[in-house]
């Protein structure tokens, strides 16, 4: 006999109990989706700028820990890479944080300033179509995906009137927009020329850069060139680190994954959601089994084996996990959209995450069923009749 109809009939007999169970499972599913979503958004946003950089090889200081904590090194080391025949061009990059003044309410907030030579673009034309404005003194490009606390810069710029504000106490003009996006490390970004960057950060020297970007000629052997650069530039002096683009991305992800408590917190939040759901489902199944103990004993007296009764409980658990997952999934889509609009973080639903949470929900319910199923074994017909 196929047991699922009986499992479903038992569950829907107490409709209020079923709704409470689905609400509890849905809450656990939402909690896991939110925690995993924030964790992925953390890693995705932390490398959003790295992914947009158009270089093949990157030089950084060995003392740098992440994009928000870069240490400067001599640009002379970057110029040495021009000695390799496979190198097509280089771009020195300056990075630092400064206080941006909201032109409407005059409040200040830290913003990431990215400086480079406009004649040597580091981003694609799709991201930054026109670098001409930043060739002028005290002109910057503003990231329109920055948090709203920086002010309605996009709307003000669209009016055609000059958008003037202060960065690090220096009066600057917004000469254009681009769309990169905020991250956990930077709430907003502006782009300017290397000359303007050094005007903003007057204590910085032009010979000390934060990232050196190297672009190779088509057909160049990336792996062999990196090995050669490490042998010639990195190992003898230990004042620069040579990374491929993939290694540069992993360098940033590893910082947020292992050097901060954020990754651990999100993982712990997911585990808590899993445990909460397990406890809720266990209580529901245990109560259901207790209420139907006489029916289980009757089935035993009719000749049904323990295996059938155990499978009945596990099927109830699977049904609960699927029915609880559906509203949790739909509500999570809305919460993702709300969070994305409020924080400008790249938090989206993915198929892999949906499958993972569904598997976690089913595992959660099956574990609960495995604990509660011991009560079925106590259903002795001799005691009932």
Image (cartoon, helix red, strand yellow):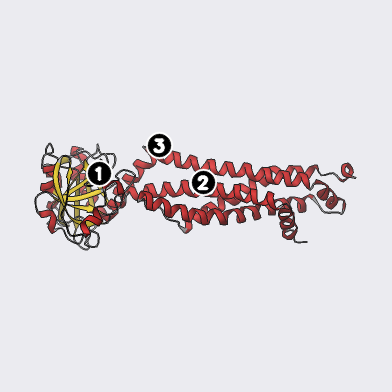
**Residue at the disc numbered 2:** 31
Q: Secondary structure at mark 2?
A: helix
> Percent position (x, y) of residue 162?
15, 54
Is residue 97 visible in the rendered image? The answer is: no
Q: Tell which circle, 3 or 2, labels the residue nearer the N-terminal end.
A: 2
Rate crowding at label 2 as few (under 14), some (14 to 19) or many (20 or more) other CA atoms within 10 Å. many
The residue depicted at 78 percent of the width and 49 percent of the height is: 306
Q: Is residue 246 left or right of residue 15?
A: left
Q: Are marks 1 and 3 in contact (CB under 8 Å)?
A: no
Q: Nearer the viewer, residue 340 or 63?
A: 340
> Percent position (x, y) of residue 171?
13, 45
Rate crowding at label 3 as few (under 14), some (14 to 19) or many (20 or more) other CA atoms within 10 Å. few
Relative to 204, say whether 136 is above or below: below
**Residue at the disc numbered 1:** 105
**Residue at the disc numbered 3:** 261
Q: Tell which circle, 1 or 3, labels the residue nearer the N-terminal end.
A: 1
Q: Secondary structure at mark 1?
A: loop
Q: Is residue 21 left or right of residue 294?
A: left
Q: Quadrant of the C terminus?
A: top right
> Percent position (x, y) of residue 345?
36, 50
């Amino acid at each position: 006999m196929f047991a699922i109809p009986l499992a479903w009939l038992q569950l829907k007999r107490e409709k209020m109990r079923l709704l409470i169970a689905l609400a509890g499972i849905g809450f656990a599913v939402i909690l896991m989706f939110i925690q995993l979503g924030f964790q992925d958004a953390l890693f995705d946003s932390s490398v959003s700028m790295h992914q947009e950089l158009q270089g093949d090889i990157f030089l950084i200081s060995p003392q740098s820990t992440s994009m928000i904590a870069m240490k400067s090194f001599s640009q002379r080391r970057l110029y040495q890479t021009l000695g390799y025949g496979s190198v097509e061009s280089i771009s020195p990059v300056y990075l630092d944080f400064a206080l941006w003044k909201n032109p409407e309410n005059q409040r200040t907030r830290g913003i990431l300033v990215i400086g480079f030579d406009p004649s040597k673009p580091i981003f694609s034309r799709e991201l930054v179509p026109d670098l001409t404005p930043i060739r002028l003194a005290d002109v910057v490009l503003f990231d329109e995906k920055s948090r709203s606390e920086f002010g309605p810069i996009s709307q003000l710029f669209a009016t055609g009137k000059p958008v003037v504000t202060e960065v690090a106490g220096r009066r600057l003009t917004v000469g254009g927009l681009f769309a990169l996006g905020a991250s956990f490390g930077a709430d907003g970004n502006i782009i300017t020329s290397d000359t303007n960057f050094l005007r903003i950060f007057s204590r910085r020297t032009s010979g000390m850069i934060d990232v050196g970007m190297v672009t190779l000629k088509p057909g160049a052997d990336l792996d062999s060139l990196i090995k050669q650069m490490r042998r010639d530039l990195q190992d003898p002096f230990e004042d620069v680190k040579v990374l491929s683009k993939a290694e540069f991305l992993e360098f940033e992800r590893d910082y947020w994954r292992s050097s901060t408590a954020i990754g651990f917190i999100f993982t712990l939040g997911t585990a808590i959601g899993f445990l909460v759901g397990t406890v809720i489902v266990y209580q529901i199944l245990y109560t259901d089994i207790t209420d139907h103990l006489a029916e289980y004993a009757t089935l035993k007296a009719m000749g049904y084996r323990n295996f059938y009764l155990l499978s009945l409980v596990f099927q109830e658990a699977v049904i609960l996990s699927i029915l609880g997952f559906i509203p949790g999934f739909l509500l999570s889509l809305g919460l993702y959209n709300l969070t994305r609009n409020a924080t400008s973080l790249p938090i989206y639903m993915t198929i892999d995450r949906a499958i993972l949470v569904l598997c976690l929900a089913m595992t959660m319910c099956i574990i609960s069923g495995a604990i509660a199923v011991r009560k079925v074994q106590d259903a002795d017909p001799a005691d009932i009749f």
